[in-house]
Amino acid sequence: MQFPGGMKEAMKQVKKMQELMEQKQQELAVKRVEASSGGGMVKVIANGREEIVDIELSKEVVNPDDIEMLEDLILAAIKEAQAKSKELSQREMSGLMGQLGLPNIPGLGF
C-alpha cells in the first residue's frame, strides 16, 4: 500500500489524529446533557462520554407506596440522558473526522 508523501507523512497524520481524538475525549468529559421524566421531577445529567454524573429527584416524586413508579421514572431519564450523550459524542466525533479531512466511517464507534 502506497501512502501519499510516504510512510513518515502517514505516521504524522496518525499522530495528529490521535492527539485530536484525545483532546475531543477530554472535551466530551466536561460537556453535559440533561434529561428528565415525570414532568421534570426526575433529572439525570450525563457527560459527553455517556457517563451518568448526577441524578436529581423532587421530593414530590418520592412516594414509599409507589417505589415502582419512581424506578420507572429514573430508568426513563437515564435512558434519555444516555441517548443524548451518545448523540453529542457522535456529532462531536463526526466533526473531528471532517476536520481531519476523513470520511465518517460507520462502525468506528462515533
Image (spheres, rainbow, N blue to C red):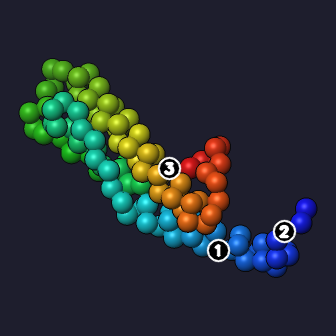
- The tag earlier along the polypeptide, 3 or 1, is 1
The numbered dot on residue 26 is: none
Looking at the image, which residue is at 64% across and 44% down? Answer: 106
Instruction: From the top left corner, tell me how far across and down residue 33 is, in percent.
Output: 32, 50
Amino acid residing under circle 3: Gln
Please state which of the two labelled residues, at mark 2 or mark 1, is closer to the viewer: 2
Closest to the observer, 57 or 64: 57
Q: Amino acid at mark 1?
A: Lys
Of residues 3 and 44, which is closer to you in this image? 3
Secondary structure category for the residue under label 2: loop
Q: Is residue 51 above or below residue 65?
A: below
Q: Are marks 3 and 2 in contact (CB under 8 Å)?
A: no
Q: Residue at x 36, y 60 (%)?
A: 31
3D distance between C-alphas at marks 2 and 1: 16 Å
Residue 27 appears in which quarter of the rendering?
Answer: bottom left
Q: Is residue 87 left or right of residue 106?
A: left
Of the numbered discs 3 and 2, the one sitting upstream in the chain is 2
**Mark 1 = which residue?**
16
| Label 1: element kind | helix
Along the line of sight, the residue nearer the viewer: 9 or 64: 9
State the SS at label 3.
Answer: helix
- Disc 1 residue crowd, few under 14, some 14–19, many 20+, Cα 10 Å: few
Cα gap from disc 3 to disc 2, whole angstroms: 28 Å
Furthest-right residue in this view: 1
Few, some or many residues within 10 Å of mark 3 (<14, 14–19, 20+): some
* Residue 37 rendering spot, x and y as whole percentages: 23, 33
Is 97 positioned to the left or the right of 31 in the image? right
Disc 3 designates what residue? 90
Residue marked by disc 2: 3
What amino acid type is highlighted by mark number 2? Answer: Phe
- Quarter location, residue 68: top left
